[in-house]
Amino acid sequence: MMMLVLICPECNAHNPPDAESCQDCQASLAGVAPSELPDSLDSENEDFDLFEPEEKDLPDLLYFLKQDDQAEDEESLLEESGASQPEESPDQPEEHTPEWLDTVRKRAREEEDSAGELIRRVSAAQETLAGDHGESHHEDFESWIQKLREEARDKAAGQDEASEERSSGEGEAGESDPEWLSRVRKAHGSLEPPREPDAAGRSLLEWLVELEEGQEENPPEEEDGEIAEAEVTQPIRTHGDEAAGDRTQEVRTGTTPAKETETAKAELVTVGITRDEHEQADLLATTITDERADRPTPLEKPKTAGWLVRAILALLLITGMSLALFSGSQARLPGGQLPPAGQALWDWAAELLEGASLLLVFDYQPGYAAELELIAAPILKETLAKASEVAFVSSSASGTLLAEALLTEVMEASAVPKDSFPVENWGYYPVGAFGAYGIASGLNASMQLPNLPEPTLTFPQRDYEGILILSDQFDGAQAWIEQLTVLSPDTPVHLLVSAQAGPMLMPYFESGQVSGMLSGVGDAAGLESVMDQGGVVARRWRAYQVGTLSLVAMLVLGVMISLIAQPQSDRRGEV
Amino acid sequence: MKKILGIAVAIIVGLVVLAGYFFQSQLSPILALVFEWGLVLIGVAGLIGIGYLLAMHMRKIVRWEKRSFFSIIVLIAFLFAMIAGILLTPQNALYRDLVLNVQIPVETSLLAILAVTLFYASLRLIRVRGWTPMSIAFLASAIFSLILDLGIIQTGVGTIASTVLAFFERLPLVGARGILLGMALGGLVVGLRVLLAIDRPYGE
Amino acid sequence: MTWTLLGWIFIGLGAVILLVLGWIIKLKGYPPRRMPAIQYLQGSRVAAIERGRHQQIVLGHQLWSRVYPGLGLFALSVLPSLLDPENLVNGDQAVSTSDGSVVVFAQQIIQGRYQEGFSTSLHESSVRAALPGPTPLSFTAGLLADVQAHPHGSLALFGDYGPEAALWAMSAARRGGQVFAAAGSIASQAVLYLELRDLLLGEEVFMVPGLLAPTSLNLAGLLTEDILRIGLILLLIAGVILTLVGVV
């Protein structure tokens, strides 16, 4: 009775005909044609393996060598495969091939790539060995084998009955024996693979030994669930030039039962391969093969979509803010009132007496010049009209230029003559914090040493009616506040800062260290409404509101998109 | 020897400044001297930084690296601005216009690009960060703060609503102070590590 | 007992703990936090070398500031950990800052690391400190030009910088670079949180030296900071309670 099974193309495991994936390696069985197996084999191997349990540990080389060796007589074997009987004479060993071997050969005929890379390599190696230069490749190997053979023979205690039977068997086999078998018989007259008394199953090597001995052995019964783990030496043969003599390679298999001989047990140099190691070696070979397989190059995701989205968003933002900026309608100002800090600052400016002296600190970058001019211009217009003396220091690289530009613009706008009062430039301090500290600490030449640089600037020792700090950053303004409020505790300090610095500086107003503060376009627009002067700032405030609302809309839209779209792959570090 | 000298100078100066807090009257002249030297050195470091900038561009030109043509433009502009500043002085209106009319639009454009970048990034906040408590809290606080900043919500003076609104307006400040406390703590440990020669930022 | 005196006691305690843990006990077993961002930083630097792409380390805009006093020094303390022999020999790595004093220190550190790794007579390294611009926005313009000219495999941001860091990150990331940021300032934290996954916020940045190079001294610094943090929390709670009760 034949039974249909699906042989896995990856691991050669047997699977039920209706299986969709391999039970062992989970490979897909789609497109795999069912193969016929005799029931006897299937019943013996519950896991539908091709090999007997004791044969699982046979090294691949042994198996493949056997396959290659019999490939030469493939045609004759195919004719006789159907009549394979265990009782056949050893003259025709191919007729005693196990069913699993027939299955493999059939598959090898049907599928071109079933032989595997290793088999092809071995075949190629054998062809090379069979060539004219084959002898040269095996000189070293031959010497090793020769050494082993000599050691074994030296310790042999004479020929046993088995070797005589083998000799007789050789004579009967005669010329019909395969070449490899002849060599085996010649080389291993006294070597017989030991056999575990409790060995289970029928093994390839055992079959080889049987052929040598010229007798058929009954397949040993398989023990319940246990496979012999004995380390025994099994001779296997490598193909090569006959003139080079017999060359054998011995390998120890972990689960191959065989006859024991004293010589085989004692003296041979063998390499132990356990079942786990064998499986790992197979896995390694599979992994190497898989890694060398051609793979399609992953296509990079086109990034034009991201660029397009950015461009569209930028266009939307610019369009919206431009419409708000140039539409012409009056903007709704924040409550029509200044916050308390701004009101305090405006009140101080409005109540400033004539002939006041002012100190201006410029601590902002040119990029924030537009915002700070919006904030500072109304205050400066109000105060410069009453000032009699103005001094300024700067702690940004372009602070001096920005100061000159702002003062010139304000004076022109308020029709104040530029030379109506002196404007003193007290210079530029490279680092705002250090400059402020330097001013506060005095920087006087109390300890003058020869050849030491003098402090270039000293803080003007006069009472100012007000100090205005123009800053775009919290930390710069904080440094100036802390130093100036200590240096001149009676001088009111006011802040004209950008929107990002305002919230962090509010505690200084609430604690009384700062007398007033205007922060951002919103406060500037409120001041404009209080002063009742046009709507220039109001339109900018409206554009600011449009931008802020757009940002809120983007955040909300992003949440909605993330709920709908698939999550991004976890590619860290990238935007 | 060179290493030991650097470490010794750093530790001694650090300890002197620290001790000056407790012994102000005795150490004030030394402290003043140290600070003056520090200010001079910082100013010189600024010039050295400019030197590094020039050296970087000159190296690009000499090696003719990619986009080294723009390095030529940078050097020409630098020389022009420096020579014009020396000859015309920063008080000159022409010089002021020349510099500011280039610098202000360039920096303003960078800030505008930053605004658009943040605009786009806000769209991808959840996709980048995922649905974590931190990102949800950030999202909620950002939306709320932005709406508050618009001035849309108006309340009467002295009402409960104004108190609640003032509370929420202070929350970002509370968070910022917490961050600053942590940064101060970290700065303290960093300073101690320098004083104890564990870290040597002045080179080894 | 004033709050100022209490603060000084706090500082003195920190110094003693650091001294004991770093030099006397020589702490070795303190497990630092697991920060995936640090691991990705190290991986991105290796990948940048393997792919032949440029690496950039930004050290911020200033060495010292009133608000963030330790950020500049922190950036310089991280730099030696990022200058391994492979990067020094491979080159194609730049260290950028907009502060003259920071760039001088950085160049000293690079030369010192090179001489330590190879020979004291060799002081030339292909890794150089650069100053693309003296102000934050001019630095941004210079850095963006460099990012566009050289495909960056890794961009690491340390030190004191502002919201313009969002432009650096976006520019590098759009060209396939991996961006890591230790954001200490408030403004940079806010903008970079929108863009980056590999981001350390606030006082987390001070753990970077201990995570990159877990030597006994760095681990001692970590543990000291943790102890001081717990002490500070307790002090704050105590202060609030005392204020509510009316004692203070």
Image (cartoon, helix red, strand yellow):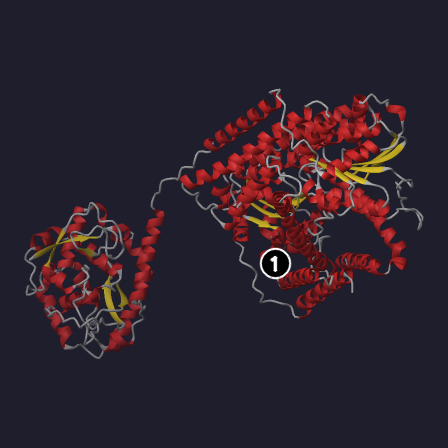
Residue A347 placement: quadrant: top right
Residue A1 placement: quadrant: bottom left
- Which residue: 55% across, 42% down? C194
Give the vertical position of C14 relative to A192 (above or below).
above
Question: Is A250 left, or right, of A388 in this rendering?
Answer: left
Which one is nearer the viewer's eye here, A368 or A204? A368
- Would you say residue A242 is visible in this rendering? no
Residue A156 placement: quadrant: bottom left
* Residue C92 in the image, given as x and y percentages of width and height: 59, 43
* Residue C114 in the image, given as x and y percentages of width and height: 66, 51
Question: Is A304 left, or right, of A122 in this rendering?
Answer: right
Which one is nearer the viewer's eye here, A402 or A447? A402
Please name the amino acid that badge 1 sits on: Gly
* Residue A43 in the image, given as x and y percentages of width and height: 13, 63
Which residue corresponds to mark 1? Answer: C210
Question: Is A252 left, or right, of A84 in this rendering?
Answer: right
For mark 1, name the chain.
Answer: C
Element at label 1: helix
Query: Quadrant of the image for the N terminus of chain B?
Result: bottom right
Query: Quadrant of the image for the C terminus of chain B?
Result: bottom right
Give the vertical position of A47 relative to A124 (above or below).
below
The crowding category of the residue bearing disc 1, from other C-alpha atoms within 10 Å (few below 14, some 14 to 19, many at least 20), is many
